[in-house]
Amino acid sequence: MRALLSVSDKNGIVSFAKGLEALGWEIVSTGGTFKSLASAGIKVIEIDEITKFPECFEGRVKTLNPFVHGGILYKRADEAHMAQAKELGVSGIDLVCVNLYPFKATIERTNNFDEIIENIDIGGPAMVRSSAKNFQDVLIVTDVNDYDVVLKRLKNKSDDLEFRRSLMIKAFEHTASYDSMIANYMNQRFSNGFGEYQYITGKKVFDTRYGENPHQQGSLYEFNGFFSQNFKQIKGEASFNNLTDINGAVKIASSFGDENAICIVKHGNPCGFAIRETLLESYIEALKCDPISAFGGVVAVNGVVHKELALKMNEIFLEVVIAGDFDEEAIAVFESKKRIKLFSYSAPKLLIAKDGADFKHIDGGFVYQNSDSISDDEIKNATQKGSLSATSSEMKDLEIAYKVAAMTKSNCVVYVKDSAMVAIGMGMTSRVDASQCALKKAKDMNLDVSRSAMASEAFFPFRDSIDAAAGAGVKAIIQPGGSIRDDEVIKACDEHGIAIYFTGVRHFLH
């Protein structure tokens, strides 16, 4: 039996080759892999001896040869193939171990296009695809993590069809992901990121129990190892719906840097937010906004959960707490709650991946765009439009309200007082409905909205929302502006003694 080993990532390759050698396999290799194996004392045949042709063109051509691909592709159970292989002097290659040139690492390290081009693997993907096509006769190994299981299977003679098929699927996934990465990079470099095709690839992290509903299947996939490297399941397993709620809560809570922000989310919508001197105080204030909706909700904590905060959280049923981290005493507190789920990023503060692109499935395809982001400069550089200016504390409230509104389903209006959200209306078909719905909910919760700051993620098309805000005692408003009736809105603010600021940036979320 003959194995061809040709890898860029050489972690574990010597041990793998020694394992094959111990099982009686003949080893063939190329370039740097050959040198690594030979220096480790492994009896290895250089690829030139098989191809009868030297590596050439600075290593661009090594394995693109009939003696390689013929040895991989001919069918062992086909008499005609066997006869032709014998006639041509083609010896079988029964295992191929390949991982590809580090294209991703190269584009992260340099913008030199000549170097990037040289790190596009040609022979590697060709061997992977050939081996995967003939998986019934050839084992194709593309994952360093599979070395031990392959050796075990060979030793136990349990490399059956099902196992070979699993390696085949992984191999085609490997080359598909690699080619997608190259195509996306080229389109990003030369087509502003919007080529004729858009490839979205992610690696599975884990299966969820089901999707949004029990009759649906679900899994979490990641970009660039984000969840594998950062997300830790401390207690319980994350469901499909947990993950989408966590996404919304973490984005909001983490958008305030190192501040002690707490965001409570239910069914994808924020129902509580606050920033205070301590996380405990932040949680208490956030919960006041809508404690009914918070029941069974997701709480994002921009920091480390300690015992005191855990005890307070344990007073009601929360489905998920996601935090920078938890100390051991806090985890012990939550042990008494069977249904609560705890997840962390094993860091002092919450983390976000800052993906550069965003997409949404629609029936028959998907729409794709650059990711929206809310810059602190939008609030800092917002233009005062009316005759009144906001105080420093009102500006902080405007910042909070604006960020929450920008990351919540449109139409959205948010009211914040003393760095805590006191009312929110979201996902409404009109902005005035969102304003009034928020105020009604605040009244039901006996929350005082007077002297609060209000934000909208898009312009107010009429002054009716301003009139409603004035009736509730709002003292400052921030919005993008851009309506043909902006002057009427500004005039209404002046009439009611409300400071009004325009950011010039709309943040629809549909």
Image (cartoon, rainbow, N blue to C red):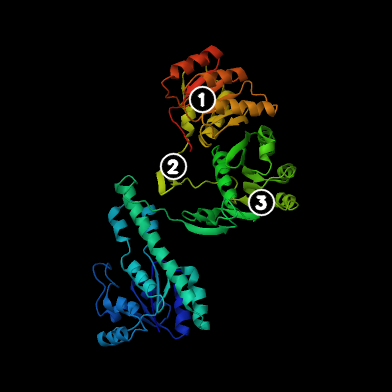
Residue 454 placed where, x, y %? 56, 25
Dot 1: what SS? strand
The residue wearing badge 1 is 478
Q: Is residue 31 left or right of residue 288?
A: left
Report the quarter where the N terminus lies.
bottom left
Q: Is residue 269 left or right of residue 89?
A: right
Disc count in the image?
A: 3
The residue wearing badge 2 is 371
Query: 36 or 108, which is in the foreground?
Result: 108
Q: Earlier in the sequence, mark 2 or mark 1?
A: 2
**Image quadrant of residue 260?**
top right
Residue 331 placed where, x, y %? 70, 52
Q: CA distance from mark 2 to mark 3?
A: 29 Å
The residue wearing badge 3 is 341
Residue plotted at (55% across, 37% down): 256
- Amino acid on which the number 3 mark rests in the picture: Lys
Dot 2: what SS? loop
- Amino acid on which the number 2 mark rests in the picture: Ser
- Amino acid on which the number 1 mark rests in the picture: Ile
